[in-house]
Image (spheres, rainbow, N blue to C red):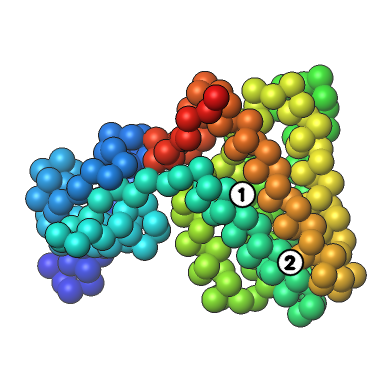
């Protein structure tokens, strides 16, 4: 076996371990605060120690695990405040991305790709009486946000957004499923789409401050969805990674 094939196999095993371990955490099969050891995961995931070790390190980098003084890692628990802050940070960074895109001047290709993506979203949300295809909406929404980040042409900023977006409840489309149970679903998606259009217009016009403000406000929709979910366990179950959130007792 060649060195390249050995390397590819090792990478494949690491990715397999990482994905499997992330699923255990997000589904709540590993409880917040629970210690996660290499040997335990080797047996549970069916891969060797090196891929498991790498997977543990990567999930710590994503913020789903935390190192503990006695060695090893534990599943991280998040307070409601930390979840809101993660969404706010994502909105702030996306606002910066929009401002940089406007100030640098986005290419015609990027502007066209973004506009075409929004046209597709229009087709999904346009008809109020037709059931909205949320899966398609989520995919298109994620694509638009990726195009926006690419427009900023800042690898450093992109890395920071990737990090905060790795927290399952903080990504741009994470809380869209919660909207699906709201009687205001169509209205909320229409408002979000209008914000998409406005930020793209601001970028094209080189209006950096306006583009930044719109994207920061855009993140407030996720805040609203989370506030709604926190009052209803049935809706909370739709929030990705909800098992990691320590909910405060409400009167």
Q: Which residue is mark 1?
A: 172
Asked whether the viewer can see residue 248, the reply is: yes
Q: Where residue 75 appears, x then y in whole percent?
A: 29, 48
Residue at point 28%, 45% (across, down):
33
Q: Where residue 78 appears, x then y in whole percent?
A: 43, 46
Q: Secondary structure at mark 2?
A: helix
**Left or right: 191, with 233 as reference point:** right
- Whether 188 is drawn above or below 215: the answer is above
Give the camera-side residue of 152 and 234: 234
In whole angstroms, how far apart are the C-alphas of marks 2 and 1?
14 Å
Q: Where residue 67 appears, x then y in whole percent?
A: 26, 60
- Whether 50 is drawn above or below 134: the answer is below
Q: Where residue 149 appears, x then y in whole percent?
A: 65, 65
Residue at point 43%, 40% (across, down):
245
Q: Which residue is mark 2?
A: 98
Badge 2 crowding class, 10 Å Cα cut-off, few under 14, some 14 to 19, many 20 or more, is many
């Amino acid at each position: 076996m060649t060195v390249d094939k050995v390397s590819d196999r090792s990478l494949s095993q690491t990715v397999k371990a990482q994905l499997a371990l992330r699923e255990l955490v997000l589904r709540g099969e590993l409880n917040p605060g629970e210690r996660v050891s290499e040997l335990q995961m080797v047996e549970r995931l069916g891969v060797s120690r090196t891929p498991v070790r790498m997977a543990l390190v990567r999930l710590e980098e994503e913020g789903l695990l935390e190192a503990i003084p006695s060695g090893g890692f534990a599943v991280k628990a998040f307070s409601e405040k930390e979840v809101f802050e993660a969404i706010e940070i994502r909105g702030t960074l996306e606002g910066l991305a929009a401002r940089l895109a406007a100030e640098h001047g986005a290419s015609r290709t990027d502007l066209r790709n973004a506009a075409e993506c929004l046209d597709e979203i229009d087709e999904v949300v346009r008809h109020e009486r037709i059931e909205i295809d949320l899966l398609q909406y989520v995919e298109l929404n994620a694509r638009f946000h990726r195009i926006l980040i690419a427009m900023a042409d800042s690898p450093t900023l992109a890395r920071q957004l990737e990090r905060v977006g790795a927290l399952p409840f903080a990504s741009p489309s994470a809380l869209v499923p919660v909207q699906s149970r709201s009687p205001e679903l169509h209205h909320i998606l229409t408002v979000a789409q209008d914000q998409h259009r406005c930020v793209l217009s601001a970028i094209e016009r080189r209006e950096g401050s306006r583009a930044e403000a719109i994207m920061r406000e855009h993140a407030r929709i996720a805040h609203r969805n989370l506030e709604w979910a926190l009052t209803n366990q049935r809706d909370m179950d739709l929030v990705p990674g909800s098992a990691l959130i320590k909910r405060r007792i409400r009167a």
